[in-house]
Image (tube, rainbow, N blue to C red):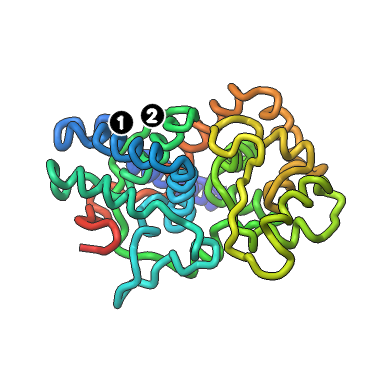
Amino acid sequence: MRNSNKNAAVLLLILLFLSSSTSTCNAHLSSQFYDHTCPNAVSTIRSVIRTAVSRERRMAASLVRLHFHDCFVQGCDASILLKDAPSITSEINASQNNNSVRGFEVIDSAKAEVEKTCPGVVSCADILAVAARDASVAVGGPSWSVKLGRRDSTTASLALAQTELPRATDDLQTLLSNFARKGLTAEDMVALSGAHTLGQARCITFKDRIYNDGSDIDAGFASTRQRRCPATGGDQNLAALDLVTPNSFDNNYFKNLIQKKGLLASDQILFSGGSTDSVVSKYSRSPATFKSDFASAMIKMSEIDLLTGSAGQIRRICSAVN
């Protein structure tokens, strides 16, 4: 009995320590983090993002995706921005990122503008988080409060990028497990997938789907997509993820899935007789619910495994460690 009590006490201490560690990490975050050290940081970033998106609407999707691909590898630490160096093998080399992730020059521009007035203060990781929010707003998507105080990593992990980032061919259980490891629910996953209401995909990522004569794809939709994506060649040709309103943040993505018009296999699998069908149906009926849940899921995602306090560094240039 005495050993049982002792074990219970040890377990309680471990749980308290873990809880304390998590709350300590979050305690470093605040939406007012730069109010005194760089009061114009958020408005400066917003201005750069608005300009970039007004120049190219697709950039909104690219910036949301860049933040997502950062957070899923080592946490939201701007590791995705690091270029190859003697001690760094860039995450950009992962197949899920190579010739795919973009928007680096926009983040660099925002960083350069902030550095002019507040050198060495604002992290690249925070710029990514703010940029994703402002990109959403710029195309009619939801806004949300971004807590700030992230710090930048001094490392990147190609190996983690290759194993942790979702693939266009993932089945539902693989996707659910992947997101669950990051503390995200099935509903979070479906909501975040709704970011595919924007942006484009390369032919190579959906070629198999549009030529396999499967029962999970609308024949007319497949035929339309084949015009820009030949069975042989054309791998880098682009197609809108949402054929109906490719440049607007709305819930048509979910309506497309119900009609078997999801471009990627990992899109359509969300509505294929599985456990996420009901969530897709809910968002197809209520754009307001989708936008609200998307904002909540983005907040959760933006706080995965952060570096705060004295951990990491504030990079002077986002693509290289100091």
Closer to the N terminus: mark 2 or mark 1?
A: 1
Kindly state the secondary structure of the residue where label 2 is placed: loop
User: Looking at the image, which is closer to me, 281 or 62?
Assistant: 62
- For the point 66% across and 23% down, the residue is 286
Residue that carries the numbered disc 1 in the rendered image: 31
Quarter assignment of residue 90: bottom left
Q: Is residue 123 above or below residue 84?
A: above
- For the point 16% across and 50% down, the residue is 120
Residue 212 seen from this side: yes
Give the CA distance from mark 2 to mark 1: 7 Å
- For the point 28% across and 56% down, the residue is 318
User: Looking at the image, which is closer to me, 262 or 171?
Assistant: 262
Judged from this view, the residue extending furthest toward the front is 227
Asked whether the beta carbons under mark 2 and mark 1 sit within 8 Å of each other, the answer is yes
Amino acid type of disc 2?
Ser
Q: Is residue 74 above or below residue 29?
A: below
Kindly state the secondary structure of the residue where label 1 is placed: loop
Quarter assignment of residue 253: top right
Residue 206, how many percent across, how many down?
68, 57
Residue 9, how many percent across, how many down?
47, 45
Residue that carries the numbered disc 2 in the rendered image: 145
